[in-house]
Image (spheres, rainbow, N blue to C red):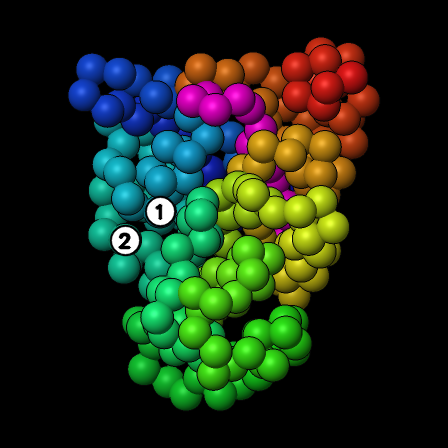
């Protein structure tokens, strides 16, 4: 059995009186790609935001390599090896590609040259556009930059919130190829994605969230073959 890098136990997240995440529990094995799928409002983003320290959980534990991240500052969570590629990419439009990458390493005190070279090897297009303002990049290139920026913190676990959102189908395939390549380099991936077909094809393990609760789980390929999943999320 794979070692567990992230373990969520009875996680609850509320906004005012509305409970967005209702006591979910799941594990992320080290070195795997795990996906959470579900409709808008199912609690997927709230789960990632709680893990990243952007919202404080109402209760539950978020155990990463044995440390409870619940309530920890975002910067300390990044230092521990967890990073988030947010929905909508959120690159700094007026800064260059290179400047955006360097911001991803803001907590580091060592030299960045090897990591910048690594990101440019993964994304040759970013190297070509190194001195270009990030706001002038295409949507797919901005997504590459958002991933590259996250990698600059040397994460052990990279969380991705809707990486294919708003991208053309051909570009989406390229983004999922990148996710697989990053994973091959030893980074564990926790992915939420509306494109359930691509997500389940890519993931080792999947969890289905409905109105804040996990209703199904299993290997990605098994969920792809499930009739209820096909009907609800794959349009079949």
The reply, left or right, for residue 144 in relation to residue 213 is right
The answer to which of 113 and 28 lies nearer the viewer is: 113
Extent of the magenta region: 31-42
Q: CA distance from mark 1 to mark 2?
A: 6 Å
Q: Position of residue 115 (x, y in %)?
A: 52, 79
Q: Residue at x 28, y 44 (%)?
A: 54
Q: Where residue 74 is drawn, which disc sits there? A: 2
The N terminus lies in which quarter of the figure? top right
Q: Between residues 10 and 106, which one lies in front from this camera angle?
A: 106
Disc with the residue nearer the chain's start (1 vs 2): 1
Q: Which element carries disc 2, helix, strand or loop? A: helix
Q: On residue 79, which mark appears? A: none
Number of marks present in the image shown: 2
Q: Is residue 113 above or below residue 144?
A: below
Pick out the residue farthest to the left: 16
- Tell me the quarter of the picture where residue 78 sits: bottom left
**In this image, 35 relative to 156: left or right?**
right
Q: Residue at 31% across / 73% down in the picture?
A: 106
* Residue 59 in view here: no
| 25 or 201, nearer to the observer | 201
Side (left or right) of 73 relative to 227: left
The residue pinned by badge 1 equals 52
- Quadrant in which the C terminus appears: top right
- Within the magenta stretch, is there residue 32? yes
Q: Position of residue 131 (x, y in %)?
A: 47, 83
Disc 1 and disc 2 in contact, CB within 8 angstroms = yes
Q: Residue 86 location in percent, x, y?
A: 43, 49
Q: Is residue 214 magenta?
A: no
Task: State the residue lying farthest toward the front.
Answer: 136
Residue depicted at x 44% and y 48%: 88
């Amino acid at each position: 059995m794979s070692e567990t890098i992230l373990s969520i136990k009875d996680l609850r997240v509320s906004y005012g009186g509305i409970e967005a995440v209702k006591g979910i529990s799941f594990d992320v094995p080290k070195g795997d790609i795990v996906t959470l799928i579900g409709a808008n409002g199912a609690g997927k983003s709230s789960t990632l935001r709680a893990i990243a320290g952007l919202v404080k959980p109402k209760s539950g534990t978020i155990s990463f390599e044995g440390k409870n991240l619940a309530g920890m500052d975002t910067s300390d969570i990044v230092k521990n090896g967890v990073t988030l590629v947010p929905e909508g990419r959120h690159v700094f439009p007026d800064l260059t590609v290179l400047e955006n990458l360097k911001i991803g390493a803001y907590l580091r005190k060592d030299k960045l040259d090897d990591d910048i070279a690594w990101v440019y090897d993964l994304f040759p297009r970013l190297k070509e556009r190194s001195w270009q303002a990030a706001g002038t990049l295409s949507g797919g290139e901005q997504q590459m930059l958002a991933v590259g920026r996250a990698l600059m913190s040397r994460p052990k676990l990279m969380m991705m919130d809707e990486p294919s959102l708003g991208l053309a189908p051909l570009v989406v395939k390229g983004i999922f190829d990148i996710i697989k390549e990053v994973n091959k380099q030893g980074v564990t991936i926790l992915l939420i994605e509306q494109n359930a077909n691509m997500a389940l094809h890519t993931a080792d393990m999947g969890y289905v969230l409905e109105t804040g609760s996990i209703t199904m789980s299993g290997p990605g390929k098994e969920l792809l073959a499930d009739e209820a999943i096909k009907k609800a999320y794959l349009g079949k």
